[in-house]
Image (cartoon, helix red, strand yellow):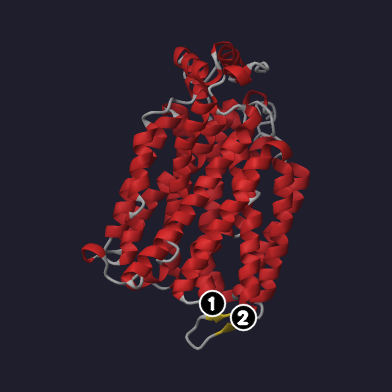
């Protein structure tokens, strides 16, 4: 392990700086995910889509996310973490432009899928990169910055949607250069995407990737810049010892050579990734404006509540950032699972009193306030726990030899579950109603309590080179 003098020799400023650059990918992840919220009815009118078509317009990006996450992990093992992040930045730019300029549903879906490739790649590569450059003793805080950035991106999307809709009069109103306001909502993303692209050229490649590719001189140089000459050499030796000498990382490493089955850590990672989505968090992020209109709020107020939700999310995540390296990962996960179970059940109770209006919309009446408070409490518990910690643990729980492959599989499952939950929500809402639909998410939250207690192990303070299979 690194000796105690690392505190004197490490370049903490550089570590934080390159972490912030990597976290811009998280901001774009959040922005691209949240910008669709507030444009759903506009897309329905622009492309004359029904509830199923609307669900696919929203979920099309998630299809790309699943593919992007799966291939990004292995591509990063082959071509490098930074290289794939650069490609994802280009895709963010193309997606933002294409989504806004699209005149047909198919063109819009193509642009969103392209953005999904970028989001999927950034969602797993930013945590990998941060975990691989950050010292173990404050790795959790720096990795939490990724989730803060995701939430900042969501909040940025909600806020820009709200401002543009108010400036134009409504999201469907014609605005600058004779384009509707909802199109400008997508074009705003181009600005942070350009910043991300430029900034990536000024950060080094992950030293663990360089070692895996036998680029030892470059790895030694990066580690020396990060940790100092002496501790950089120690870390280089530890990284070498954690990698198999007979072949580079591959998907076959996910299996135990003795039993032929997947390593236990792979199953834990996959279930962790799936449960995070099955608890329904992105239904609130993607369909929040529709939910709040059902609670009796106007479009203008519904968009403003989305901004409030973003503020609550960031506040919760900042609490985690300050405490995670002292409390650990597992206690936060358990707290979140219990809190989300309670708040989701309260939402189910409120939604059980909903009535169908004459125009076919859900109306909550006197229970709208309970739904609003419970939903924001649910968002708080998610973002103090499963929101940041799932990505933190996926970035650090896999041993060096299987980190890229393990995250590729977990990322595919995570985004696949996200896709299924998102595309199914409008259909479930039409068939079952609000209460029954949210009961599904509540059951998943209750299952997560059992999973955390019996299957999740603590990774706080452990070096990446000592993570067990």
Q: Position of residue 435 (x, y in %)?
A: 64, 73
Out of 426 and 357, give the one closest to the viewer. 357
Which picture quadrant has residue 351?
A: bottom right
Q: Is residue 359 above or below residue 203?
A: below
Label 2: state its secondary structure: loop
Q: Which mark is residue 44?
A: none
State if disc 1 and disc 2 touch (CB < 8 Å).
Answer: yes
Label 1: state its secondary structure: helix
| In the image: residue 57, left or right of residue 444 | left
Q: Is residue 91 above or below residue 43?
A: above
The residue that label 2 is drawn on is 354
Q: Going by the picture, which residue comes out furthest to the left?
A: 177
Q: Is residue 193 above or below residue 135?
A: below
Q: Label 1: how many residues lie within 10 Å, few (<14), some (14-19) or many (20+)?
A: many
Pick the quarter of the image with the C terminus: top right
| Chain-order first, disc 2 or disc 1 | 1
Q: Position of residue 155 (x, y in %)?
A: 48, 56
Q: Position of residue 18 (x, y in %)?
A: 47, 31
Residue at (63, 75) in percent of width and height = 369
Q: Which mark is residue 294?
A: 1
Q: Position of residue 84 (x, y in %)?
A: 41, 34
Work out whether residue 249 can be spotted: yes
Count of numbered marks: 2
Q: Going by the picture, which residue comes out furthest to the bottom?
A: 358
Q: Is residue 150 above or below residue 181?
A: above
Q: CA distance from mark 2 to mark 1?
A: 9 Å
Q: Label 2: how many residues lie within 10 Å, few (<14), some (14-19) or many (20+)?
A: many
Residue at (56, 70) in percent of width and height = 428
Residue at (71, 60) in percent of width and height = 341
Residue at (69, 59) in percent of width and height = 340
Out of 241 and 71, give the one closest to the viewer. 241
Pick the quarter of the image with the N terminus: top right
């Amino acid at each position: 392990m690194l000796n105690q003098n690392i505190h004197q020799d490490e370049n903490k400023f550089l570590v934080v700086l390159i972490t912030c650059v990597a976290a811009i990918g998280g901001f774009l992840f959040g922005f691209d995910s949240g910008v669709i919220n507030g444009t759903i009815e506009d897309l329905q009118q622009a492309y004359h889509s029904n509830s199923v078509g609307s669900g696919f317009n929203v979920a099309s990006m998630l299809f790309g996310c699943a593919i992007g996450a799966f291939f990004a992990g292995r591509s990063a093992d082959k071509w490098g973490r930074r290289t794939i992040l650069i490609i994802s930045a280009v895709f963010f730019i193309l997606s933002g432009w294409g989504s806004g300029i699209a005149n047909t549903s198919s063109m819009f879906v193509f642009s969103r899928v392209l953005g999904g490739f970028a989001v999927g790649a950034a969602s797993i590569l930013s945590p990998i990169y941060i975990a691989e450059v950050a010292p173990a003793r404050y790795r959790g805080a720096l990795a939490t910055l990724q989730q803060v950035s995701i939430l900042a991106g969501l909040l940025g999307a909600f806020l820009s949607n709200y401002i543009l809709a108010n400036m134009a009069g409504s999201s469907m109103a014609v605005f600058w250069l004779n384009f509707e306001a909802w199109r400008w909502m997508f074009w705003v993303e181009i600005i942070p995407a350009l910043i991300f692209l430029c900034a990536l050229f000024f950060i080094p490649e992950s030293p663990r990737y360089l070692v895996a590719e036998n680029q030892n001189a470059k790895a030694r140089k990066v580690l020396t810049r990060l940790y100092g000459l002496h501790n950089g050499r120690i870390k280089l030796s530890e990284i070498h010892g954690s990698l198999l000498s007979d072949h580079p990382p591959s998907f076959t490493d996910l299996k135990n050579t003795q039993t032929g089955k997947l390593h236990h850590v792979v199953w834990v990672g996959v279930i962790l990734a799936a449960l995070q989505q099955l608890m329904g968090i992105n239904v609130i992020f993607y369909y929040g404006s529709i939910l709040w209109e059902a609670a009796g709020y106007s479009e203008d107020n519904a968009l403003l509540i989305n901004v409030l939700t973003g503020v609550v999310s960031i506040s919760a995540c900042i609490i985690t950032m300050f405490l995670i390296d002292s409390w650990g990962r597992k206690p936060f996960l358990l707290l979140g699972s219990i809190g989300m179970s309670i708040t989701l059940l309260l939402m189910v109770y409120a939604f059980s009193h909903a009535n169908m209006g004459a125009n076919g919309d859900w109306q909550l009446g006197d229970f709208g306030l309970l739904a609003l408070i419970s939903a924001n409490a649910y968002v708080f518990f998610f973002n103090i726990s499963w929101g940041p910690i799932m990505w933190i643990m996926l970035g650090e729980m896999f041993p060096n030899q299987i980190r890229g492959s393990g995250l590729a599989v977990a990322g595919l499952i995570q985004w696949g579950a996200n896709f299924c939950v998102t595309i199914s929500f409008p259909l479930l809402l039409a068939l079952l109603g609000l209460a029954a639909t949210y009961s599904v998410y509540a059951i998943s939250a209750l299952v997560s309590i059992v999973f955390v207690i019996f299957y999740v192990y603590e990774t706080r303070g452990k070096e990446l080179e000592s993570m067990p299979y």
